[in-house]
Image (spheres, grey):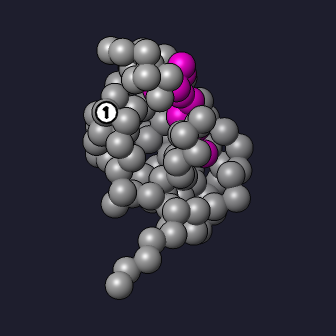
Amino acid sequence: MDSNQQQQQPQYRCVIVCQHSSCLRNGSAEVLQAFRDYPVPNVIIEGSGCMGQCSSGPTVRVIPDEIWYCRIKPHDVSLIVKQHLIGGQPVEAKLHPRIHPRFYF
């Protein structure tokens, strides 16, 4: 890997999985555990309080990328890990539409 590629990749990432009441009712504890079951070097996995996206949970935020995912289920985690956390490409189909609006023509 050359120095330009090293500068483009963050030194670390943190995956934050909401563990507040409405997300918990929709399975966020299982989503958090699924992320913990797929350890990735330089990626920290944490539960959080409310992230203000209650109608779209479980909510997952990846920082410093500032990528927000919504309605995540445990079976979505392996794709997020492989494609985003390892491959560097967010999973477009799971992006939160309020935070990552898309325009279709």
The C terminus: image quadrant: bottom left
Between residues 88 and 58, which one lies in front from this camera angle?
88
Name the residue rendered at 51%, 69% in the picture: 101
In percent of width and height, residue 20 lies at 66, 49
Q: Is residue 80 above or below residue 52?
A: above
Quarter-of-image position of residue 37: top left
Name the residue rendered at 43%, 15% in the picture: 3
Residue denoted by label 1 = 87
In percent of width and height, residue 9 lies at 46, 26
Between residues 88 and 48, which one lies in front from this camera angle?
88
Name the residue rendered at 48%, 36% in the picture: 32
Magenta includes 89?
no
Q: Is residue 26 above or below residue 42?
A: below
Disc 1: CA contacts within 10 A as few (<14), some (14-19) or many (>=20)? few
Is residue 90 toward the left or the right of residue 62 in the image? left
Tally the marks. 1
The N terminus: image quadrant: top left
Which region shows up in magenta?
Answer: 9-18
Q: Amino acid at mark 1?
A: Gly
Per the image, label 1 sits on a secondary structure element best described as: loop
